[in-house]
Amino acid sequence: MATIFSKIAAGEIPSYKIAENDKFYAFLDINPLVKGHTLVIPRREVDYIFDMEDEELADMHLFAKSVAKAIEKAIPCKRVGVAVMGLEVPHAHIHLIPINKESDMIISNPKQKLSDEEFVGIASAIKAAWEKNKVDL
């Protein structure tokens, strides 16, 4: 059975897409800790990130790096934090979270409530930065 993330990557469920290639897909978290909170997933269904083959895991991190660089250009932040928890959806994923202080990464913090217009604007800004600087991975 396909995961919700597989359905998002396939376009069966709408998302605020940031970036994609044939192996990976990045989109805004709809329950973000902060504006610009992005998820990076492999298109291949795999539950646990450390069950991925070494090359695929390395490629996913390089793809996530390119997305993080775009987030840095589009969202005012000191850094982009990285988190892998993997319990909420049974599909490997990386959280990229723009941070200005360490407490921005606390997953139990209240989630932001953003309008569709805010999500669209954020996604457009990050996607434009990614498109401008993307490399084939």
Image (cartoon, rainbow, N blue to C red):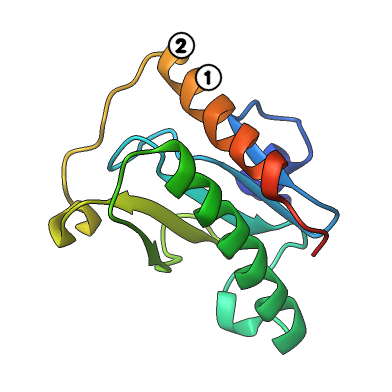
Give neighbour class at mark 2: few <14, some 14-19, many 20+ (Cα, 10 Å).
few
Give the quarter of the image for residue 58: bottom right
What residue lies at 76% left-to-right and 32% top-to-bottom? 11
Three-letter amino acid code at the position of disc 1: Val
Pointer 1 and pointer 2: residues touching (CB < 8 Å)? yes
Could you classify mark 1 by the number of other residues whose Cα lies within 10 Å: few (under 14), some (14-19), or many (20 or more)? Answer: some
Q: Is residue 74 above or below residue 135?
A: above
Comparing 136 with 39, the one in front is 136
* Helix, strand or loop status at disc 2: helix
- Residue shown at 71% from the left, 48% from the top: 6
Residue shown at 52% from the left, 19% from the top? 120
Position of the C terminus by quadrant:
bottom right
Which residue bears the numbered disc 2?
A: 117
Please give the name of the residue rendered at 72% of the width and 51% of the height, measured from the top-left corner.
134
**Residue highlighted by disc 1:** 120
Position in image of residue 85 (x %, y %):
39, 68
| 78 on left or right of 64 | left
Q: Distance from label 1 to label 2 (Cα)?
A: 5 Å
**Of residues 125 and 24, the one drawn nearer to the viewer in this rendering:** 125
